[in-house]
Amino acid sequence: MTNGLPEPMITVTSNDHESLNSNDVQRAPSILRHLHSLAASPGAPLYLKCELEAEANLQIEWSFNGKPISMNPDERFICKATLDDVLTTTLETEALQLEDSGIFECRFSNEFGTAFSVAQIFVRAPTTEEINPDFVKYPPSVNAVESGPIHIECSFSSPVSTVIWMVNGTEAPPDALIEIDAASRQVVILSLPAMSADLFGVHTVQGVDGNSGSLSPICSFAVSPTSGALLVNGGI
């Protein structure tokens, strides 16, 4: 508790696992398994999970649309962390509400740096109105190393002529490459040849139907700095 308010962070220390001590922490956090975006109906449960290399002396903070989520167990969203061979943190709620649509972020920090992952959650009431184009495959959050490339694949329910790619609220840089599958016009690959410090953070993607001008929902994904950890099963 701080000033009578619930602490918005989980802190993992060397006391939480007998095999870890302060000498084990020699680098910034490395995510092994990222959060995943999804669509759900009101009343459906939500369970988000993120895994890291087992590090001690680590702070974990969950947020929703940029606002910290309280760690108070009486709140509607329950956040937990367990430390074993890997560090696992979860966020869950029994029943989503329409106002829960947005960006959930999990951020990890220690004295050496920060890593983060985001999931875009779409809570939609049952309706006969079809969304086109809509995401069939959401763009995944990924790890990247500075000066290294990234390749992000997503797909849409109907053909798109253009894709809007934003990086931390601004247009993707000139060397960003957007490839739209020539046959289907539904599969998109986003590439950057060399990551720089300003390109880490939250990216967004939106598809545009060239015939109707209809816009897809905006989906967010994170590009998180890493010390070189390998993703488990590609992060899936």
Image (spheres, rainbow, N blue to C red):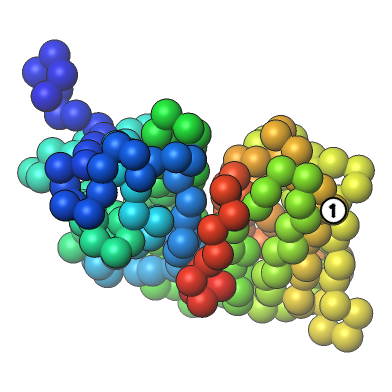
Which one is nearer the viewer's eye here, 13 or 60?
A: 13
Which one is nearer the viewer's eye here, 217 or 201?
A: 201
Across and down, in percent, residue 199 comes to 71, 40
Residue 78 lies, with reference to residue 173, above or below; the image says below
Which one is nearer the viewer's eye here, 95 or 222?
A: 222
Which one is nearer the viewer's eye here, 177 or 127?
A: 177
Name the side, left or right, on which 201 lies relative to 69. Answer: right
Please name the residue shown 29% across and 37% down the image. 22
Name the side, left or right, on which 144 lies relative to 79. Answer: right
- Residue 97 visible somewhere in the drawing: no
Please name the residue shown 78% across and 55% down the image. 149
Residue 169 lies, with reference to residue 216, above or below; the image says above
Please name the residue shown 66% across and 61% down the image. 216
For label 1, the residue is: 193
Name the side, left or right, on which 168 lies relative to 112. Answer: right
Name the side, left or right, on which 220 lies relative to 91. Answer: right
- Classify 10 Å Cα crowding around label 1: few (below 14), some (14-19), many (20 and above): few
Q: How many labels, in total? A: 1
**Residue ranking furthest to the bottom:** 183
Residue 65 lies, with reference to residue 178, above or below; the image says above
Across and down, in percent, residue 124 comes to 42, 64
**Residue ranking furthest to the top:** 3
Specify the quadrant that holds the N terminus: top left
Please tell me whether mark 1 sits on a helix, a strand or a loop.
Answer: loop
Please name the residue shown 91% across and 43% down the image. 174
Across and down, in percent, residue 226 comes to 57, 48
- Residue 31 visible somewhere in the drawing: yes
Across and down, in percent, residue 121 comes to 44, 58
Please tell me in which quadrant of the rendered image residue 184 appears: bottom right
Please tell me in which quadrant of the rendered image residue 93 appears: bottom left
Going by the numbered disc 1, the residue's amino acid type is Pro
